[in-house]
Image: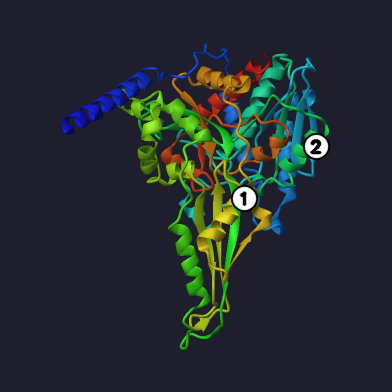
Amino acid sequence: MLKTLIKALLAVLIVILVVMIVKTFFFTSKQVKAEPADVFSVDAKNVVRHLSDAIQIPTISFENEADFKGADFLKFHKYLERTYPQLHKKLQKEIINNYSLLYTWPGTDKNLQPIILLAHMDVVPVEEKSISQWTYRPFAGSVADGFIWGRGALDNKADLLAIMEAIEALVEKGFQPKRTVYIVSGHDEERGGIQGATKIAALLKERGVNPEYVLDEGMVITEGMMPGVSSRMGLIGIGEKGYLSIELIARSEGGHSAMPPRETAVGTLCKALDKLINNPFPARIDGPTKYLFDYAGREMSFAQRMIFANLWLTEGLLKSQLQKGKTTNALIRTTIAPTMLEGSNKDNVLPNVARAVVNFRILPGDTPDSVIEYVRKTVNDPSVEVKPLIKQVQGPSPVAGIDSKSFLTLQKTIRQVFPDVVVAPSLVIAATDSRHFAILTKDVYRFAPMILKSEDMARLHGINERIAVDNYLQMIKFYRQLIINSQI
């Protein structure tokens, strides 16, 4: 009987192994073949100077709205007019809500859906105490060591100016698009885009604009950041996590700390936070994350491909590995991050009220309502008030198509300009202006043709923000090729 059982077990294992090998054998690359991009050259010295000059105009989105300096944004508008005269002659320019920009390049075929290219003009502030740590001053626009340095070099003036350089060059050559092209540049993306991108999206909806696709920042070309894939990866964000902050409020009798009650507000609050932190949302490999591994896994060694080709068996193992890293963990679950704590303002006084703010980045498939309900059930304490911060609620974006003509156009263009790059769909874990344009089309993509290594990620909103000169020239080439490819 035992021998029969062992034989049966071995037979099952052999069948499983054969199935895994066969599935892996057919788990082949999804990369498209693309002919080289059109030969195109720009005056490198001039275009680099243009970005350098743009960085020197401090279009800052301050957290305190009272600190907003509209004059700097208007100065930036004038700078764009002087720098791209052909673009401003050919395209229709509108100023939305005083500071945001909407350009329209009319196409010759009104039956073709337009495309929308987004790139915001505002930048985050630089902390005064960090300035001494910058290699070059953050608003000097220094060009040195093969890089253009300064706030906005990555986020997001390089993108905006690359788009404009590409269109300026196309206009000069007499190119006329069949498909209308819109350029959208918001002035408050770093504060949520409520006054800029939101207003423009609503205006375009009112005008009946139904774009073929929308392209904004969000993902980039990564180098050495995907274990198992030796090539650089061009990640196209096809979805964006949602955003929600929740207050946890505990109350108790205040008084002198020398005579504390059995339960204090701080103690109650800490118990609630402990429950949340130790009960994370369930991990899921689906949606954009599953697509990412489907594309990336096909470029790995046979042994690694076997894991991704057989998620029906290996998903649990993969989840356990992914949740060990903070970036990969964020790809597979709604994350929980306590960010603010408030109690007494004196060390020997018991507070009547203790308050915490917990930030959640919501995975597609979850919703703000389901997150709030999860928090209430997990805390499971009627003495702790669970209160969402309504002004900061944003559900996950719809997921854009990967079988659409638009995705194929993006994939092809990336491969034309960066032939060695493996292209894959991905999930954006931060927030961009693109989410406001979901009211116009499902096909909203998030990709900027910047090449970044893992150490470069800290430069975003951080110290020593910079873009390589060679990469910036490639960015211009990418947008020119994308506009041409999109005319089909």
Q: Which mark is residue 368?
A: 1
Which residue is outermost to the front?
1
| Residue 209 relative to residue 266: left or right | right
> Residue 390's image quarter?
bottom right
The spot of residue 43 in percent (x, y) is 59, 22
The spot of residue 58 in percent (x, y) is 64, 46
| Residue 127 relative to residue 193: left or right | left
The spot of residue 368 in percent (x, y) is 62, 50
Amino acid type at mark 2: Leu
Question: How has the structure been colored for display?
Answer: rainbow
Q: Which mark is residue 227?
A: none
Q: Marks 2 and 1, Cα distance to the nearest angstrom?
A: 27 Å
Amino acid type at mark 1: Pro
Residue 185 can be seen, yes or no? no
Q: Which residue is at 59% across, 41% downward?
A: 152
Q: Which mark is residue 203?
A: 2
Quarter holding the N terminus is top left
Residue 379, compared with residue 86, is above or below; it is: below
Residue 442 can be seen, yes or no? yes
Badge 2, how many Cα within 10 Å: few under 14, some, many 20+? Answer: few
Residue 70, compared with residue 482, is above or below; it is: below
The spot of residue 267 in percent (x, y) is 47, 73
Q: Secondary structure at mark 2?
A: helix
